Every structure is written in C-alpha cells, then in structure tokens.
C-alpha cells in the first residue's frame, strides 16, 4: 500500500515538472528573438551608418489600426519618404524591434533608439527617436545626425 501512495506522489511531481518545462518552452518561444530577422535588421541599420547594440532592448507585437489617425498618417508619410510601404500594412499584426543607438549626435545626453517595424521578415518602417524631455523622431535614412569620428 505504501508503494502505491509513493508512486502516486512521484507521478504528481513528475507531471508538475513536465508541465512547467512545457510552459517555459512555450513562453521562451513566444518571446525569443528570431535570429535571422534580428541579423537582417542589424545589418540594415548598420549599413546606413548607425551603430547600435545588436540585441534589441524591446520587442513589441502591435496590430496596426485599419485606418490611420493623424499621428499614424504623419509617421506613414515619413516612412513613405524613406521608401517604406508602412501604410500598406493597416490592420496587420507587426513586430517592432527597438535598439539603442550609440552614435547619434544626441546619444550622450538622450536615450536614442532605432525602431524598426517588421511584417513577415520584411522591414516596413524604421525611425530614430528619443522620448526624452526634448524628444525627437526622424527617418532612419536621415543620417546627418550620425556622430563623425
């Protein structure tokens, strides 16, 4: 009789551990970095001359609205000027990768980031910005603010 109780107790422990492992794997899969996408983004940003931390500081999943308000329209216009088809992705689930920028003229005084929107491994928009007191945003292709050596 004692063997049966012990066996049931161990089965419960093993089942609990197995469930925890599966749950951790699911969570890790949802929030892990897709290395191929990250490498594509880092190469794109660096090819423009920006120096960044290669690991994103934030990854956010966003559903773009079906119709853009004034803020999205302005952002979309900046993206269109830079050659990105941001407006074509209204209503789509996209991912925004954020990287710390190291060589912007304001990097020493502000937290400057590069934000890149991706849809199915395609870059659909990107900007350089700072949310500080005197925040700013400009096209990622506007490289005149890169510190020169």
Image: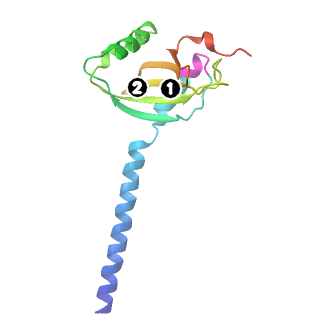
State yes or no: residue 46 in magenta. Answer: yes
Element under label 1? helix
* Rendering coords of residue 111 (x, y %): 59, 28
Above or below for 115 versus 36? above
Residue contact between numbered discs 1 and 2, judged by CB atoms under 8 Å: yes
Displayed quadrant of residue 109: top right
* Disc 1 target residue: 41
In this rendering, does residue 4 appear at all?
Answer: yes
- Residue farthest toward the front in the current orientation of the protein: 133
Answer with left or right where residue 133 lies relative to residue 68: right
Displayed quadrant of residue 43: top right
Distance from the alpha carbon under mark 1 to that under mark 2: 9 Å
* Rendering coords of residue 140 (x, y %): 52, 16
Magenta stretch in the rendered image: 44-50
Q: Residues within 10 Å of mark 1 (few under 14, many from 20)?
A: many
Residue 51 — which label? none
* Disc 2 target residue: 118
């Amino acid at each position: 009789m004692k063997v049966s109780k012990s066996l049931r107790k161990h089965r419960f422990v093993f089942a609990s551990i197995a469930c925890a492992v599966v749950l951790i794997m699911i969570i890790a899969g949802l929030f892990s970095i897709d290395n191929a996408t990250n490498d594509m983004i880092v190469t794109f940003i660096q090819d423009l001359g920006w120096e960044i931390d290669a690991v994103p500081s934030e990854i956010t999943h966003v559903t773009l609205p079906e119709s853009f308000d004034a803020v999205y329209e302005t952002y979309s216009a900046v993206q269109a000027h830079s050659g990105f088809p941001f407006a074509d992705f209204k209503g789509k689930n996209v991912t925004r990768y954020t990287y710390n920028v190291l060589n912007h003229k304001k990097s020493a005084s502000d937290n400057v980031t590069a934000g890149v929107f991706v849809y199915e491994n395609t870059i659909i928009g990107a900007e350089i910005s700072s949310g500080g007191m005197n925040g700013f945003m400009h096209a990622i292709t506007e490289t005149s603010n890169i510190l020169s050596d």
